[in-house]
């Protein structure tokens, strides 16, 4: 009995830490509607700053707790600086495009922390006065864990009082429900957004600072915690701090006992719980319909077919690609294959998001399914390269068909997080099923057939498959099916009112996008000769999102431009010291200079140049 009580208390202590970062994330999303990937960076900075303070100034209990509060306050000021200098400039940009900015901030903060504190991990001191253990039913329980169990509900109570007993809190709750109406009533939204972002950053920094006595301070803290924090926010309901607390307790306690009973499931348990909750309650435990969306956006202009001039330029570009093996080096050909793979993957995701209006945070699942299916078919089932290239897209389509049935019944962030849950569940299975998938050792020796083994030959195979897949996606986008998807994206109520079976159309579109992502995975696995669980990881899904959003989600050329720029810049800067800082700075420059993405920026530039030329001719 005592042992199980100890596990319960450990889970509750973990829940308090998780609640602090999740509550800040929930507040920021509720008010600003920003999906803040940089929130984990605030958590990490809180830990680093607190470690520096408490190890530099030895003032006993007062020094430790003062250091924790000062660290959280400093992080809140950093958050305010980021909000005022970066995010405030792009609040009118498409909401998901703001996600790109926060990703750039993550990269910059990573390298800033590396430059200041170095790459080594730091073990913080125990909290003075709470550095021992007490025995409860014969089991030793750290005093610090008991303190955390108290701190979580206390912070929840303070937040409740702040939101229900102050004018600012009432405005924040109003903005969470209807941001447009709050602005119409004359409330200074810039001030409100800044204050909410500052509070969210403070809570994240506080959570990181309180972790110093419990775990090593490292550069991995941000990415290790942000996924679970998003899960907690979604389970609780977007914008609900109480929901975040209940979800944090649920996830942490289940994890504490799952480690004992079924250790293999612990790495994906939060995502399984999230998937179950979203299927049963599509808006989370305490969420309300509409909480997953921001202010309604204006319908986009209809898609236009390419002009004859644009078609000729595109044909010339494809012809130049076809001739490139004549003069390009082997390394350049390999890099160009990487660009083609990334472009096909990004185009398939863009079809899902830009045409279908279904945001996916887990599109790598279908990329990985295609890659693993082709590898298994080649290595263990005796298939040749060409039959295996058929199996891969079928596997991606089958996975999308199964998961898509559940996903299309949701919308907004809830849909995106359910796709993430599906990808993480598949990743967990792949990572731990050693006998079938090779586990973290992957599957090696998946090379092209002998006739396609040269770099030049495989480049042509990749060119045909990827360009063919991109052409197919474009044709479908301009077909009646594609226009039906766009109509359902812009106004689902109207689409259903005129008799469109929107869910079925979205399900088919989801499946088609999965098949093309699987094809990209097939080209990838034969290009690299191996596949590992990373092919289904969150990081690859995020890369795909960045490609689509960086290029521009409102243009069919967006993912092509975004993927090309992303891969080429990443290849260049990754050879440099502090490459994350450089890469993140480049992303922020693009975000601030072209809030509609690269394609939108080029289109705007073209219109300005054309307008200037017409004006000059008129004056002449």
Image: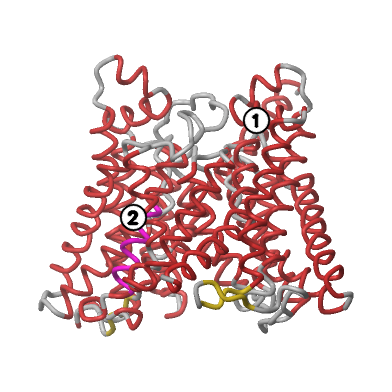
The one of 175 and 89 positioned closer to us in this rendering: 175
In which quadrant is the C terminus drawn?
Answer: top right
Which residue corresponds to the image point at 86% horizontal and 68% vertical from the top-left? Answer: 62
Q: Are marks 1 and 2 in contact (CB under 8 Å)?
A: no
Residue 213 lies in what quarter of the image?
Answer: bottom right
Residue 564 image offset from top left, x and y in percent: 50, 59
Front: mark 1 or 2 = 1
The one of 200 and 376 positioned closer to us in this rendering: 200
The boundaries of the magenta stretch are: 420-431
Say whether residue 115 is magenta.
Answer: no
The one of 561 and 578 positioned closer to us in this rendering: 578
Judged from this view, the residue extending furthest toward the front is 137
Pointer 2: residues within 10 angstroms few (<14), some, or many (20+)?
many
Say whether residue 429 is magenta.
Answer: yes
Q: Main secondary structure of the magenta part?
A: helix
Q: Is residue 300 left or right of residue 279?
A: right
Residue 368 lies in what quarter of the image?
Answer: bottom left
Instruction: Classify 606 as above or below 335.
Output: above
SS under mark 2: helix
What residue is disc 1 on? Answer: 173
Q: Tell me the CA gap for discs 1 and 2.
A: 32 Å
What residue is disc 2 on? Answer: 422
- Give the mark nearest the N terminus, 1 or 2: 1
Colouring scheme, one of rainbow, by chain, secondary structure, one colour: secondary structure
In which quadrant is the N terminus drawn?
Answer: bottom left
Pointer 1: residues within 10 angstroms few (<14), some, or many (20+)?
many
Instruction: Classify 600 as above or below 613.
Output: below
The one of 227 and 533 positioned closer to us in this rendering: 227
């Amino acid at each position: 009995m005592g042992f199980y009580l100890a596990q319960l208390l450990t889970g509750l202590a973990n829940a308090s830490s998780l609640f602090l970062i999740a509550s800040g994330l929930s507040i920021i999303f509720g008010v600003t509607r920003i999906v803040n990937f940089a929130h984990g960076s605030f958590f990490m900075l809180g830990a680093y700053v607190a470690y520096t303070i408490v190890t530099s100034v030895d003032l006993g209990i007062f020094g430790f707790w003062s250091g924790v509060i000062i660290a959280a306050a400093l992080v809140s000021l950093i958050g305010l600086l980021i909000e005022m200098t970066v995010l405030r400039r792009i609040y009118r940009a498409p909401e998901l495009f703001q996600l790109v900015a926060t990703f750039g901030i993550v990269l910059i903060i990573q390298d800033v922390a590396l430059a200041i504190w170095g790459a080594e991990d730091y073990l913080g001191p125990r909290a003075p006065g709470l550095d021992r253990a007490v025995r409860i039913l014969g089991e030793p329980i750290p005093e610090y864990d008991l303190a955390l169990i108290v701190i979580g509900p206390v912070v929840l109570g303070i937040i409740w009082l702040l939101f229900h007993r102050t004018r600012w809190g009432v405005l924040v709750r109003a903005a969470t429900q209807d941001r447009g109406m709050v602005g119409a009533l004359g409330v200074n939204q810039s001030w409100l957004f800044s204050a909410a972002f500052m509070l969210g950053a403070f809570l994240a920094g506080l959570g990181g600072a309180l972790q110093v006595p419990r775990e090593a301070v490292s550069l991995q803290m941000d990415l290790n915690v942000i996924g679970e924090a998003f899960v907690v926010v979604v389970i609780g309901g977007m914008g609900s701090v109480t929901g975040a607390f209940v979800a944090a307790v649920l996830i942490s306690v289940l994890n504490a006992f799952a480690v004992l009973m079924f250790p293999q499931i612990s790495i994906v348990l939060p995502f399984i719980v999230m998937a179950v909750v979203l299927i049963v309650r599509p808006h989370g435990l305490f969420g309300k319909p509409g909480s997953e969306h921001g202010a309604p956006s204006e319908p986009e202009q209809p898609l236009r077919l390419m002009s004859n001039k644009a078609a000729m330029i595109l044909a010339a570009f494809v012809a130049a690609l076809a001739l490139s093996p004549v003069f390009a080096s082997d390394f350049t050909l390999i890099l160009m294959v990487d660009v083609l793979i990334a472009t096909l993957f990004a185009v398939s995701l863009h079809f899902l998001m830009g045409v279908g209006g279904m945001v996916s945070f887990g599109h790598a699942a279908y990329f990985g399914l295609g890659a693993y299916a082709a590898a298994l078919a080649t290595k263990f089932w005796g298939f040749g390269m060409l039959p295996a290239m058929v199996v891969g897209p079928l596997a991606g389509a089958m996975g999308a068909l199964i998961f898509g049935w559940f996903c299309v019944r949701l919308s907004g962030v809830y849909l995106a997080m359910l796709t993430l849950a599906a990808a993480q569940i598949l990743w967990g299975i792949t990572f731990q099923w050693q006998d079938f998938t090779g586990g973290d050792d992957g599957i090696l020796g998946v090379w092209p057939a002998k006739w396609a083994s040269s770099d030049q030959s495989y480049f042509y195979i990749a060119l045909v498959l990827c360009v063919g897949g991109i052409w197919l996606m474009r044709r479908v986008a301009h077909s009646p099916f594609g226009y039906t998807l766009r109509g359902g994206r812009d106004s689902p109520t109207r689409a259903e009112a005129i008799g469109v079976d929107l869910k079925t159309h979205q399900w088919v579109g989801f499946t088609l996008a999965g098949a093309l992502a699987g094809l990209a995975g097939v080209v990838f696995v034969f290009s690299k000769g191996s596949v590992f669980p990373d092919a289904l990881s969150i990081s690859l899904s995020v890369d795909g999102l960045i490609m689509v959003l960086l290029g521009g989600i409102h243009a069919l050329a967006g993912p092509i431009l975004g993927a090309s720029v992303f891969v080429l810049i990443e290849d260049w800067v990754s050879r440099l010291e502090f490459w994350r800082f450089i890469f993140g700075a480049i992303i922020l420059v693009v975000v601030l200079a072209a809030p509609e993405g690269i394609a939108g920026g080029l289109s705007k530039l073209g219109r300005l140049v054309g307008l200037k030329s017409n004006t000059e001719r008129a004056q002449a």
